[in-house]
Amino acid sequence: MEKSIFDNGFFEFIQTEEEFEIDGKQRLIKRNMVRRPPGIRALIVDLENEKIILSREFRYELNTWDYRLPGGKVFDSLADYKKSIEENTVLEHVEKTVPKEVMEEVGLIVREPKLLKVSHDGAGVVWDLYYYEITDYEISEDGPKLEEDEFVSGFVLKSFDEVMDLCTLGEIHEERTVGILLSYILEKKKVKQKQLLQK
């Protein structure tokens, strides 16, 4: 059971009652949560040269420029998101958003995005970020199509090692993205090392 307590069109405060099996016993758990529509992040990779595309975006919450994975919101309103939950079409909307957001922010045409991970924000906040790996892309002749209040100064290709440095030096401020990037790069390095040892 779910009850909406407050909704400002972007965030919603909800109360839920759900049954969970914990240590072999069914338990009815009541929880209070804040929910907002999900977002996507595109991990655009040149695997052969071990490079990742990062955008430089002005972030109002930081009052400065930040390295980011291209991405953005999936729904324009909370109402659209709630309707999609009811219709069980959230993932369908997410998949349509990936190429659209990448084109808008960095002017790249992407093909065959692959879902890497869904990052959940925490116990009391429902704000999912869908991370996609993209290895097939090309530059659009039309370039980016930014929204009026978005400021993105193109993109840069950074080596795996450079991206790791940006993460550890705090130059990429979205902590969930830092975790995804470090995990991704370390896994790719591990696979490469294993392949070298087998030769």
Image: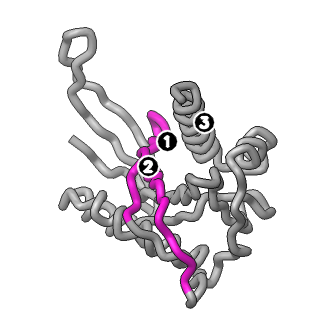
Task: Check disc 2 and give the amino acid type.
Answer: Asp
Q: Nearer the viewer, residue 16 or 135?
A: 135
Read off the residue under disc 2.
Answer: 128
Position of residue 21 relative to residue 57, above or below, is above
In the rendered image, which quarter is residue 140 located in? bottom right
Residue in front for this viewpoint, 150 or 76 = 150
Left or right: 19 as drawn, with respect to 6: left
* Residue marked by disc 3: 189
Q: Nearer the viewer, mark 2 or mark 3?
A: 3
Q: Main secondary structure of the magenta part?
A: strand
The alpha-carbon separation of the residues under discs 1 and 3 comes to 27 Å
The Cα atoms of the two marked residues, 2 and 3, are separated by: 27 Å
Report the residue marked by disc 1: 121
Q: Which residues are magenta?
A: 112-140
Question: Which secondary structure, mark 3?
Answer: helix
Which label lies toward us, 1 or 3?
3
Is disc 1 in contact with disc 2, using a CB cutoff of under 8 Å?
A: yes
Residue 47, x across and y down, in percent: 56, 53
Judge whether 181 appears above or below 83 on screen. above
Mark 2 or mark 3, which has the lower sequence index?
2
Q: Is residue 123 one of those drawn in magenta? A: yes
Q: Is 99 positioned to the left or the right of 81 in the image? A: right
